[in-house]
Image (cartoon, grey):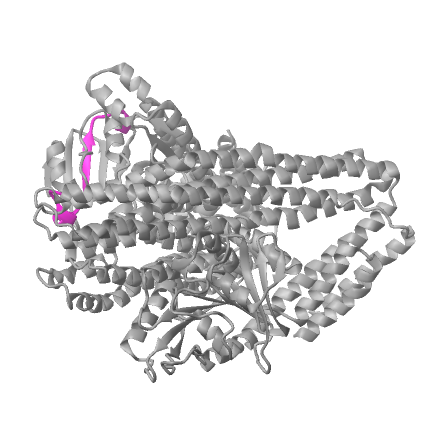
Amino acid sequence: MIEKLTKKLDLIEPLVDALNNDELTTLYRFLCDRIQNPDFYAVFLGETSSGKSSIINGLLGKTVLPVDARPTTGVVTEIDINSTDDKLFAIDRQACCEEISMEQFRQFSVKPSKDLLKLVVHKNVPNNCLKGIHLFDTPGYGAIVREHEEVLKEFLPNADLVVYVVNYAVGIQNDDFYFLRSIKELLRDDTQFVLVVNMCPPSVPTADRRIVEIRTTASNLLGSDTELFIANRITLDKASTEHALPKCEDLWRCIANMLNSPSRQQRQYELFDSFIMDFFERCYDEADNRYNASTLDDETMQMLADEQEALAAKIEGAIDTLVKPAFAELISNLPQKIEETKNAAYKAIDKEIEAKPQSANQQQVINFTTEHLLPHHVEHQSKEIVTYYIETKLDNLNQQVEDLINKGTIELQKNINVNTNPNVVKATRQIASNISKKVIDSGLRNYFSAFGGAAGAGGGIANAASHALKKIGDLIGHKFTLATHNALKHTLSKIGFTSSKVLGGTAVVLTELIFIAWDFATWKHSLRKDVSKALDQWSKDTLPPVEEDLRKLELKNCQTISECAGIIRAEITYPDGKTSAALQKDVALADQIRVELTKLK
Amino acid sequence: MKTSTSILDNQLVAILDKYDSVNLPGTNLRDRSALLQDAPKVIPVIGMQGVGKSTLIDALLGEFILPAEADETTCIPVEVKYGEPRAEVFRMGDAKPFTTVNDQDGLRQYVDNNFNHGNEKKIAKIVLYRKCKLLETGLSIVDLPGVGSLTQANQQTTEDYLKNCCAAIIVIHTIPTITKTEAIFIKSHLMFFGSSIFVQNNWGETEQELQSSTEFNRDVIDRISKEANYTGDKSITVVDADSALRGACQKDSGMVQSSNIHALISKIEAYINSWDDINGSNIIAGVGLAIEKAIKTIDAKIGEINMSQQEARAQKQKAINEFNAATGSIKQTIKDTKKYLNTKEIEYRQLVKEKIDTFTKQMQAEMEKKINGGVVDGDDIERAFRDHQESRYPDLCNDILPHLFEVKSKIENTLEDVGDIMYDDSDTNRNVIDGNPGTEDPGKKGRRAWNVAAGIAGFAGGTAFASTAAAASISAALGVATAGIGFIVGIGISLIIGAFGAWRVKKKMEGIKSKIINDMRKLYPQINSSLLSDFNNRFNDFRDNAYKCFDAILDNRQKEVDSMTEHLDDAPTSIADKESLESDKNYLKTKLNELNK
């Protein structure tokens, strides 16, 4: 399959050479490199001290990642096992990369500064069959500080595989529960998932009750059956200062199989194939535009440039006229929506408590309140009110921006038709149509993508767009994807996460009270008061992160619109010293390549 | 409606029947027209529980009659229509009322959950008679079970009402604004039923609250309308139902005036009139098509005069060939659709299975977490189970319904395509019936599709088509009425209720948790399979009814061609018949001109 892709790339090469455009050449090289060396991202997740680092150390054959009885991984750590060197790096939020010593590495890992984005381990593991793999060790979900949680959530859509590690003795805990339940929303559809039960007693059977329970719960939460691996506890000599290195051969073999599975190869092939075809279209338009531009006089070129500028300015105007007001409204209404959620939840819970007989078993009522009433109603009402409000408002904004861009491009074409000298009409129209196409292909899709998969809203288009963006993102590298992939979906699921996490805290408020013996006559009153307190706490804790997420999304939207305007401005193409005839030859070459490419299908 | 009745006089019916003894289009159209005339006009009031449906109906009637304060209603449909004031209570399966009540207290015995827990009295519906001006037109206003409260038991009654639904009143709150579940519910309604009147109930919110809330609700309605392909009226009528009701009772006309209830009443009246118009224009379109066909037949017969036996035979043979060619295209269209349905069915079943598996699995995980956390009381478990289901089930529907909608649209398109083929060879007078030449009339295709399905002789679904407004006809005829009106919740709840007796915990909690978890594990597969068969049945009903309709179309085509073949060797029309043919034709032409006006 790689051969076919390479053949296509070879076909396109003469065109790239002829165009001699820096951006296209860079993209071409990047694409070639990517096809030769595809990446595979495996992310290790799980509760604090479930042994994620140990398992990776096991693969490395050496205690590289710090492990200890107390939490040691405080920051996302990338491990590249196919490096030619053995080096350690720290990368900060400004994307500065610094080589560090082992000592520093351990220090940073245990106590990361807020400015640290991630740690990177370069390691040469000889004879491994995990070519192209990047492993990511992560802090336990419960132990993550806010900043690092963001990194993790933004990174998850890039994962090809999630390895979820659960400690045998601990089982699935509250944090695991909330995390597993909503993780699917943060992942791509084709992301694979495996479960590792770590630190099992030696020679425990897979039918062990505990293991079956863990697996059942995990599978149920994920909504689909999951592959299971067992890692045994390794007992070291009491005096040993070494750390255990679990082997987990099955797991690594399974990952290697995933890497090389025909279905994955096929997916990769399709993805790359569409990259190549997209890239070719870009080259084609470039050649076409150059030739057309060469046939136009200066006046027409100027007119075109003016039109483009006008369109770019109009689209940029959306930032101030549409995006900012919409977000300002959203953010100013947010407290009220959270208040409504709180009140709706309280009303529902109150009704249930009221309905309990005075003589009810208090313990059971409290259990019911903390385990069901509070989490259910808060979650349900947030989904119904806050999330839906944000989703609808943003969907509406999306529509307005889309209309503006559509109208703008139609107008551009119309103006060009009206104002162009009839002799050059065809060439000018062609350029105008290429511009519009590009705006719609990249700019608009870019914008769309910010809403990808927003809970069904125009799901088809948005998902397709988000897929397309993922492709563009991959062309430029993972960094780009990280910034733009599925921003809204992200924000919404993060709100879900935030609520759930905050809920954990809320429940604590109540759990503390379980031990207080209430007066028989007034227990309902007391319980209600505490529910109200817990809900107040919830709303107080929920507002800031949601607001922050919205501000980030606003920024991202403004950037996307600016990028879109940039695409329009950049489109003005003057012939670069070549004669019109030579440029026409380039178009002919492109046409010929198109024919060849079609033959390869 | 009046036009269609007056135009179908005895002579026209006789002439139309005379020239098409297979379809008897005259009788058929007259029957359909009569059916439509007598068909009840139903406007259901739908919305989430507690949104104020009963108060709104009371406000329309101008009296406190439906118990609105009930904490939880039993979700029995209450139909309000014109007549001597009384309320008849119908039990399930009975055609006659088993009792009559006269006031709010009497009604409360049946519709309030406190007096009729879980509808233990097995009431199918209540018909309330009132002498109210609005109802004089033959209108029935029906308080339908809303989201989450439609059960298998009241599904049939609900479906019966929907067959005659001319427009639905959808009630929403001012605060809270439309919620996600509510939006899904409204969307599913719009997908399958079209015409809607959005009423926002205002309970004394401030001007500012009202404005921002209405704006948001409008955004939501725009958004879901787009998703549901709904092109009808999207405006929101804001009504203060409570003031309207109190104003009416206190004879305070200022209060009634400011409540805006009159705006709603005018809207309802407009809908009833337009419903008549739609049905009338369907019939008129049908009459026009039948006249065109008859004229064509007459022309052919007149053409035979002066022909030799052989020439006449050749002409008839040519007509048969053309007819067969058209039938061939129809067969192909149907075949393509069947193929599409087959592919779609596989996709649908796959999707439904995946979604339901995830649904039940997550339900299990949630429930087990709660039980492990100490929720062990039977009532608590039941409540948690119910809450979880009510929260997630709409999402499940939201994922699945668009696929049913797609199938429905495909079947509609097929009927339209068949209509195109069937009537394409008689386009001489088409524009007279279907509007000005050149301008695409969007209703034209629909009217023709309606006539295709309703006009098939001997097709039982035709009755459904004939008695239903165009927009909803296909949904109703295809038997997916309830897919659009609400979510059938309750699957699994009865299973789980039965299991609770054993779980009432009095003393020790230890050990009981795993017992409950284990007991409940037996239930999830049952819940899974009932959900599965429910969703699959909806598709099956769709498919089966569409197939029946297609078969009937082809069967009819066969009968027509058989009849044509039978008369192949008849003697050519003799000159003696000319006068009568010409006179029939002239009459048809006069009628056509009349239609044109």
Q: Is residue B213 left or right of residue A510?
A: right
Q: Which residues are magenta?
A: B113-135
Is residue B96 among the parts visible in the rendering? no
Magenta stretch contains residue B120: yes
Q: Residue at x 12, y 43 (%)?
A: B114
Viewer-nearest residue: A546 or A54 = A54
Q: Position of residue A29 (x, y in %)?
A: 73, 64
Q: Residue at x 60, y 49 (%)?
A: A446
Q: Is residue B241 left or right of residue A460?
A: left
Magenta stretch contains residue A282: no
Indicate whether B499 appears above or below A397: below
Quadrant assignment, res B272? top left
Q: Position of residue B72 (x, y in %)?
A: 19, 42
Is residue B253 among the parts visible in the rendering? yes
Viewer-nearest residue: A221 or A263 = A221
Quadrant assignment, res A117? bottom right
Q: Position of residue A595 (x, y in %)?
A: 77, 64
Location of the N terminus of chain B (image quadrant): top left
List the single residue furthest toward the bottom.
A203
How many marks the image carries: the answer is 0
Indicate whether A278 appears above or below A307: below
